Structures are given as C-alpha cells and as structure tokens.
Amino acid sequence: MGDALRAALTAAATAVASPAELRKAAAAIRDAIEPLTEEVRSPATLSPLDDMGRGIRMFNPVVGPGNGFALPLRFEPDGDGVLARATLGPVHEGPPTFVHGGVSALLMDQILGQGAIVTGRWGMTAELTLRYRRPVPLHTPLLLTSRMAGAAGRRTTVTGAITTEAEPEVVLVEAMGLFVSPSEAKTASYFGTVRTASGGETDGRLGHARQDVDAASPALAPGPAPAE
Ligand SMILES: CCCCCCCC(=O)SCCNC(=O)CCNC(=O)[C@H](O)C(C)(C)COP(=O)(O)OP(=O)(O)OC[C@H]1O[C@@H](n2cnc3c(N)ncnc32)[C@H](O)[C@@H]1OP(=O)(O)O
C-alpha cells in the first residue's frame, strides 16, 4: 500500500493531465480508501505493524514503508555511526530541481536520532541545527550520515551531513541534533496512555539497544507479519 501511495504522490506531482482526467483519478482514489475509513485505530493505539522494541514504525514519515511520503529511508551501519542512501524526487521538491530545506531537516532529524540509538542511547529531539551550504539536488543518489558526538546524563549530541554519493567530500547540509531522554515523569505523561495493537504497554522508546541497529531499520529487520 505504501508503494501505491508513493506512486500516486509522484504521479500527482508530475502528471500532464486534463482536469477531467485528474477528477477521474481523484474519484477513484476516494472510492478506494472509503472502506478503509470505516474502522480506524485510536490515536494512542499503535498499528499492529509497529514494534517499538525493534524500532519498527510502519507509518513514520521518514522510515515507514507504509507512509506514502516516506522514501522510506533505510539505515546501514557506518563504523560507529549510521548512513542512509536516498534519491529524492518531485514530492520532496522545494526550489525547482532541489530538495525542500524542511525535508532535509526531517531526514536529518531521523538519522541523527538513529545515530544516538546505535550507541544504546535514545532521546527526543531537543535541538536540531542545520547549515545549508549548497542546495541538495533531486534525482541524485545522496548519502546521509550521522555519528554520536557526545553524551552527558540524559543528553546525546549527534552530528551528521548530506552529500551526494558521487562527491561525498562536498558537504551540502551539515546537521547537529541534541536528543534528551525524557524524565520518567515526562515519559509517563507523554506515552502512558499509548498501547500496542494487542493492548500492551509501551514506553515510547525506539529500538534502544545497540544490537537493534539492524532491527531499527525496517529494511534490515525481519519484516513484520502481515496483518490478518
Ligand atoms: C529513529 C528515531 C529517531 C527519532 C527522530 C525524531 C525524534 C522526534 O521527532 S522527537 C519529537 C520532537 N521533540 C519533542 O517533542 C521534544 C519536546 N521537548 C520535551 O518534551 C522536553 O523538553 C524533553 C523531553 C526534551 C526534555 O524534558 P525533561 O525530561 O524534563 O528534561 P529536563 O529535565 O528539562 O532536561 C534534561 C537535561 O537536558 C537538557 N535539555 C533539555 N532540553 C534542552 C534543550 N532544548 N537544549 C539544551 N539542553 C536541553 C537540560 O538542560 C538537562 O540537562 P542536565 O541534565 O545537564 O541538567
């Protein structure tokens, strides 16, 4: 379904079609999703395809295979850090032919967070700083990298960059993220009501153990069982 949604978004952004053709496609899309809206999960109930302990978030906008906006990004170990390869298209466009700056921030937030997770740490983004040195081209294989730069108490600092695969020495975007593991009180107030699809409790942490580096990427993890 995620693949179909991605194809639909790309088609919508690139189609050279008449208003009548667009209206026909829109009606078909509405018809297709109508049965899916009859019974939906509550906001505090995870999808049955999610597995927080293994870092699997099926509808995350960066790594979720089921989210039509997500590439989805897939992480690979990179020394003591993490890397991801991505080629962005018209759905992620900001200035014509270049990636939207907010999309770069979105991707870097996720991969910086992952850079903390692979060291066995976890936190919510408390600060995200980006320096846009050169525009990031669309339709071009990119490398996104991150690595923990420091840790103190509940704080983890992670740095990273976006480059092209062809010229990895030329930094297009550099990023720094501060991830703070919430206090127990905050964790309870944020995630205390969240339940798994089967009614189990979850504390909001994502794939927090170092050995979860593979599992934290849906691409590298054994796929979740299809929903009945
Ligand atoms: C693969 C997974 C990747 C995930 C990537 C995506 C991650 C996200 O999108 S998370 C969502 C966006 N972020 C948020 O919503 C977070 C909102 N902020 C908060 O909820 C809180 O401020 C939170 C949880 C960060 C910290 O709250 P709390 O637990 O009360 O921390 P608090 O006691 O105030 O501070 C703990 C330490 O962090 C420091 N700190 C907290 N916030 C900041 C900040 N913004 N800047 C600098 N330092 C900070 C404090 O100074 C303190 O330091 P020390 O221990 O040395 O005294």
Image (tube, rainbow, N blue to C red):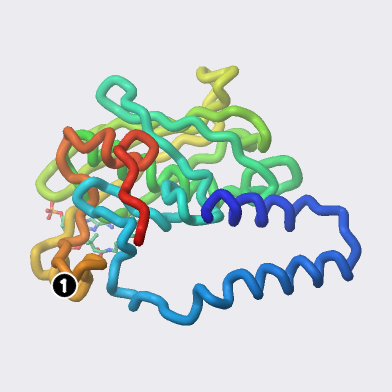
Badge 1 crowding class, 10 Å Cα cut-off, few under 14, some 14 to 19, many 20 or more, is some
Residue drawn at (31%, 54%) of the image: 125
Disc 1 CB within 8 Å of nearest ligand 1 atom: no
Residue drawn at (73%, 52%) of the image: 11
Residue situated in front as seen by the camera: 88 or 100: 88
Res 61 seen here:
yes
Q: Quadrant of ligand 1?
A: bottom left
Residue 66: % across, % down: 46, 54
Residue occupied by mark 1: 192
Residue drawn at (34%, 53%) of the image: 57
3 up-or-down from 87: above or below: below
Res 94 seen here:
no
Residue 139 falls in which quadrant of the image? top right
Residue 70: % across, % down: 51, 50
Residue situated in front as seen by the camera: 201 or 183: 201
Looking at this view, name the residue that lies furthest to the front. 228
Q: In the drawing, does residue 83 fall left or right of residue 118?
A: right
Residue situated in front as seen by the camera: 122 or 224: 224
Q: Can you say which quadrant of the picture contains the C terminus? A: bottom left
Secondary structure category for the residue under label 1: loop
Residue drawn at (42%, 39%) of the image: 175
Q: Amino acid at mark 1?
A: Gly
Q: In the drawing, does residue 27 fall left or right of residue 140?
A: right
Residue 204: % across, % down: 21, 60
Residue 116: % across, % down: 25, 40
194 up-or-down from 105: above or below: below
Give the total of numbered labels: 1
Looking at this view, name the residue that lies furthest to the bottom. 38
Residue situated in front as seen by the camera: 71 or 151: 71
